[in-house]
Amino acid sequence: QVQLVESGGGLVQAGGSLRLSCVASASTFGSYHMGWFRQAPGKEREFVARISSWSGGSTYYADSVKGRFTVSRDNAKNTVYLQMNSLKPEDTAVYYCAASSIATTLIRLYDYWGQGTQVTVSS
């Protein structure tokens, strides 16, 4: 069982930045591929970014955030990060981190989820 806790959300103006953190309880954190997802009001949850297990040498982004968001991980701290720059109002959503044994963008293949953190971008 892996427990995930996100933090770092908040209210920011368009063009601003936020860094989200997700701390995992498992000592095997390094073995999981980690993903970030978001869900805006009235919309389905969507993939944002993912990072491969262990060294995190492989990352992948949704087209909507490519070039603005960066995912990284620190296995010593059991933490995955999402640096969000040049934020836009359409980035407003609840952001979730998730853990999977597979490198994937598919929501259904992520086994463990955090409770989410709200990000609101004002225009």
Image (cartoon, helix red, strand yellow):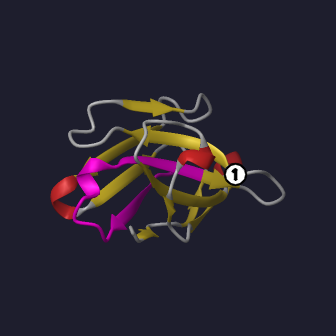
Quarter occupied by residue 54: top left
Q: Is residue 98 visible?
A: yes
Amino acid under disc 1:
Arg
Residue sitting at x 34%, y 54%: 80
**Hey, which residue is sitting farthest right in the picture?**
42
Membership of 63 in magenta stretch: no
Residue 28 position in % (x across, y down): 24, 59
State the quadrant of the N terminus.
bottom left
Nearer the observer, 11 or 103: 103
Q: Which residue is mark 1?
A: 45
Left or right: 94 as drawn, with respect to 9 = right
Q: Residues within 10 Å of mark 1 (few under 14, many from 20)?
A: some
Residue sitting at x 56%, y 67%: 116
Q: Is residue 88 visible?
A: no
Q: Helix, strand or loop at disc 1?
A: loop
Compared to 108, does 19 lie above or below? below
Magenta residues? Answer: 15-37
